[in-house]
């Protein structure tokens, strides 16, 4: 699904970016579990803190000037029409867990998946409300 078609204003654009970020992160985290037994495997993750900082900066810009302005980083690049590129980086903390305790590593990945799912659902619900679409969570 092309999420960029859901963009109607600055708030919707931010929510779509969060949805896309969490979708890609989900794929990366699932691969971390699927590929953990492969020789030479290094667990990866998206830079969540960096993404949050970029979104915070964009919100500040929106509050001040009524427009969104995104800054590129080494691993997050914003393009035209709401598109952006994300590059996963080696997750050093997860690598240490994988080397020392496989069960703790899997738990870490599952915890990240749960947190990511909450963020994805929240952004999706906010976008549905913004677009006036009935919620899957409403009674």
Image: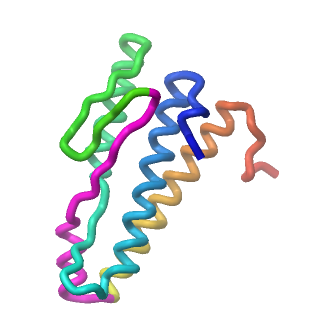
* In this rendering, position of residue 108 left or right of residue 130: left
Q: Is residue 97 in the magenta section?
A: yes
Q: Is residue 118 left or right of residue 47?
A: right
Q: Is residue 101 left or right of residue 25?
A: left
Q: Nearer the viewer, residue 44 or 38?
A: 38
Instruction: Examine the image and state in which quarter residue 57 appears.
Output: top left
Q: Nearer the viewer, residue 18 or 88?
A: 88
Find residue 112 and report its horizontal and vertical position in percent.
40, 66
Residue 28 x/y as whole percent: 37, 64
Which residue: 24% across, 46% down?
A: 75
How was the colour assigned to the protein in this rendering? rainbow
> Can you name the residue that lies furthest to the top here?
65
Q: Percent position (x, y) of residue 71? A: 26, 29
Q: Nearer the viewer, residue 57 or 78?
A: 78
Report the label total: 0
Q: In the image, what residue occupies the spot 77% across and 49% down?
A: 138
The picture places residue 94, in percent across and down from the top left corner, at 24, 73
User: Which residues lie in the magenta part?
Assistant: 81-102
Residue 62 lies, with reference to residue 11, above or below; the image says above
Image-based side of 92 in relation to 138, left or right: left
Relative to 58, say whether 133 is above or below. Answer: below
Name the residue: 37% across, 81% down: 106
């Amino acid at each position: 699904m092309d999420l960029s078609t859901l963009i109607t204003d600055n708030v919707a654009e931010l929510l779509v970016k969060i949805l896309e970020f969490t979708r890609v992160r989900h794929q990366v985290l699932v691969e971390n579990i699927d590929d953990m037994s492969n020789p030479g495997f290094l667990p990866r993750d998206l830079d969540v803190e960096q993404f949050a900082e970029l979104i915070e900066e964009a919100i500040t810009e929106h509050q001040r000037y009524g427009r969104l302005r995104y800054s590129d980083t080494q691993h997050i690049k914003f393009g035209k029409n709401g598109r952006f590129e994300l590059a996963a980086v080696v997750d050093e903390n997860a690598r240490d867990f994988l080397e020392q305790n496989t069960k703790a590593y899997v738990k870490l990945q599952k915890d990240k998946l749960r947190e990511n799912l909450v963020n994805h659902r929240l952004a999706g619900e906010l976008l549905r409300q913004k677009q006036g679409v009935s919620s899957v969570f409403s009674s």
